Image (cartoon, rainbow, N blue to C red):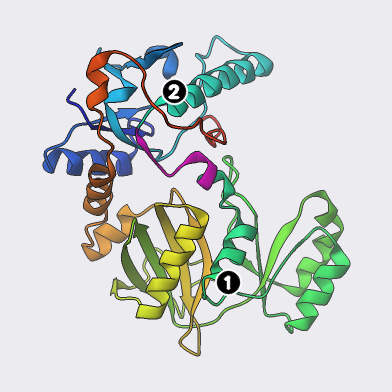
Amino acid sequence: MTLSAIGILAPEADVHARAVAREVSRLGGDSVILDTRRPHEQSWQWRVGKPPTIRTYGGVTLSVMELGAIWIRRAYGARPPDFVRHPDDRAFARNEWGHLLDAVLADTPAELVNRPSADLGATKPRQLEAARRSGLPVPDTLISNDPAQVVEFVAGHHGKVIHKALSSPQHLMIDTRRWDPRDARLLDTLPLAPVIFQEEITGAFDIRANVIGDRILAARFATADSPVDTRLDLGAPCETYELPAGTHEALLRFMKELGLDFGAVDLKVDDEGRHVFLEVNPSGQFLFVEVLTGLPISEAVARFLTSTSRDTSQAESGENTSTAAPAPARVALRDEQ
């Protein structure tokens, strides 16, 4: 393993991680994919005053000081072997591994993409406020568990409302849906958990803008005849797209405010031609856009990681001389997969 390698936190079979790793190699760099679901099959060590080390599945031992950048693609919680059966025991093991991962990341001089604090802070309410302050149009939005407030909001928009979840559960997909008058019968369950309600933005096109540093690679989907959740329309025509200059600059301001280096941003071109912000996924999928349009998104991610990679020449000393401040927030580990 050469100095200034790129670390990728993701399952070994993650196609996005593998695509970016191939591009790093093509650019002449080294990378290693670290599967946080199976740390018990690796060897992780942290000692006071010493660089943390990891021995991977292939028997390669590396110091995290050798990593110039780490892409936190999708970090899952540890998945103990099946013989660890009790839920409390599994949760305990997962939490212990989470603490060690936090310590390792806090002690590396590598650039973290995205930083855990930025990833955790990019909640949907904060996204909408940041987008508004950055000059992007946003839908009128209500997040509430109060049925009376929802009834008033729906009436104010003459029923032209969509609703969706604040987060993405691991055990099922919750799609975005158009308000149906029959939904009113379900409002008595709303106090159990809040839901996002937004005015419905209508228009012929959806935009997926992949932001990598100061570069934006965007695609336009023709979705006039698609379901309200366009992810369900796998056949929507797609082509490369150049954002208007004002929208391009506003998106960069938005990403800077949230502290994100990478994100897949969804926009809707409404009936008046405005590019309305919907949301950003800091670990969003992009290969489907790359396949459909030929946009070099994997290459752009690889170039960003290698170009932002910190100088790790200190790694040869064997001493942890990192002056990086400890990570202010824990890595947002996903549930077992």
Residue that badge 2 annotates: 104
Vertical side of 218 occupied by 204: above or below: below
The numbered dot on residue 249 is none
Q: Please provide the residue range marked out in magenta.
A: 110-118
Q: Work out whether mark 2 precedes mark 1 in sequence or the reverse, and give the earlier one.
A: 2
Vertical side of 192 occupied by 51: above or below: above
Residue 21 seen in the current view: yes
Q: Is residue 115 magenta?
A: yes
Q: Is residue 100 left or right of residue 219?
A: right
Q: Position of residue 70 (x, y in %)?
A: 35, 36
Residue that badge 1 annotates: 132
The residue under the point 39% across, 72% down is: 249
Q: Is residue 224 magenta?
A: no
Q: Tell me how far mark 2 sits from mark 1, CA to CA.
A: 36 Å
Assess disc 1: are there few (<14), some (14-19) or many (≥20) residues with their C-alpha within 10 Å of its C-alpha: some
- Amino acid type, residue under disc 1 in the picture: Arg
Figure quadrant of the N terminus: top left
* Disc 1, SS: helix
Give residue 216's quadrant in the image. Answer: bottom left
Of 292 and 28, which appears nearest the observer? 28
Q: Position of residue 32 (x, y in %)?
A: 27, 29
